[in-house]
Amino acid sequence: MKYLVMVQGSQVDYEAMVGNGSAGSPAWNKADLKAMFEHMNAINTELTANGEMLDGQGLAAPSTARFVTVDGDGRPVVTDGPYAETKEVLAGYWLLDCASLERVTEIAAQVARCPVPAGSPDYPVVIRPVDEGGPSQD
């Protein structure tokens, strides 16, 4: 079965990763970044070797996001960057093909063990099954 495994973050977390820490997210140094990338690369290598990895990407900072809605006349309304009230956004994902929910949960726990600087926010790793059947035509 296919699953989307998602990690979350915020703009302040992305800023902390380039050394601009804040009260809610301490600054990362080169060793912190190296440890995080080594951890994630090891997971990617294992998933690829096991044939479970379909895709996986880290996403650019939330400040680069673009939100598109439509107005009453159906014209696009574009807002750049996250909404002010946005606290957490999708930071990265894996699209996996795993034998069971238990297996993808093991993978999510491995992702959750990623090393981060002390005092960093703790976000859950989110698992969503991919609905490959589509809506029922009953």
Image (cartoon, rainbow, N blue to C red):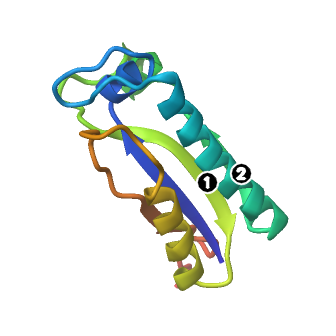
Q: Amino acid at mark 1?
A: Trp
Q: Secondary structure at mark 1?
A: strand
Instruction: Give percent across and percent down for residue 73.
Output: 35, 22
Q: Nearer the viewer, residue 87 or 18?
A: 18
Answer few, some or many: residues within 10 Å of disc 2's Cα (few below 14, many 20 plus, some between 14 and 19): some
Q: Residue at x 43, y 41 (%)?
A: 90
Q: Nearer the viewer, residue 2 or 18?
A: 18
Q: Residue at x 64, y 58 (%)?
A: 95
Q: Amino acid at mark 2?
A: Asp
Earlier in the chain: of badge 2 and badge 1, it is 2
Question: Would you say 51 lies left or right of 110 here?
Answer: right
Instruction: Give percent across and percent down for residue 117.
Output: 36, 37
Q: Which residue is mark 2?
A: 55
> Is the C-beta separation of discs 2 and 1 under 8 Å?
yes
Q: Which residue is mark 1?
A: 94
Q: Evaluate whether residue 135 shows in this view.
A: no
Instruction: Give percent across and percent down for residue 64.
Output: 46, 17
The image quadrant of residue 63 is top left
Q: Nearer the viewer, residue 5 or 85?
A: 5
Q: Evaluate whether residue 24 shows in this view.
A: yes
Q: Is residue 97 above or below residue 103?
A: above
Q: Quadrant of the N terminus?
A: bottom right
Question: Would you say 6 lies left or right of 120 here?
Answer: right
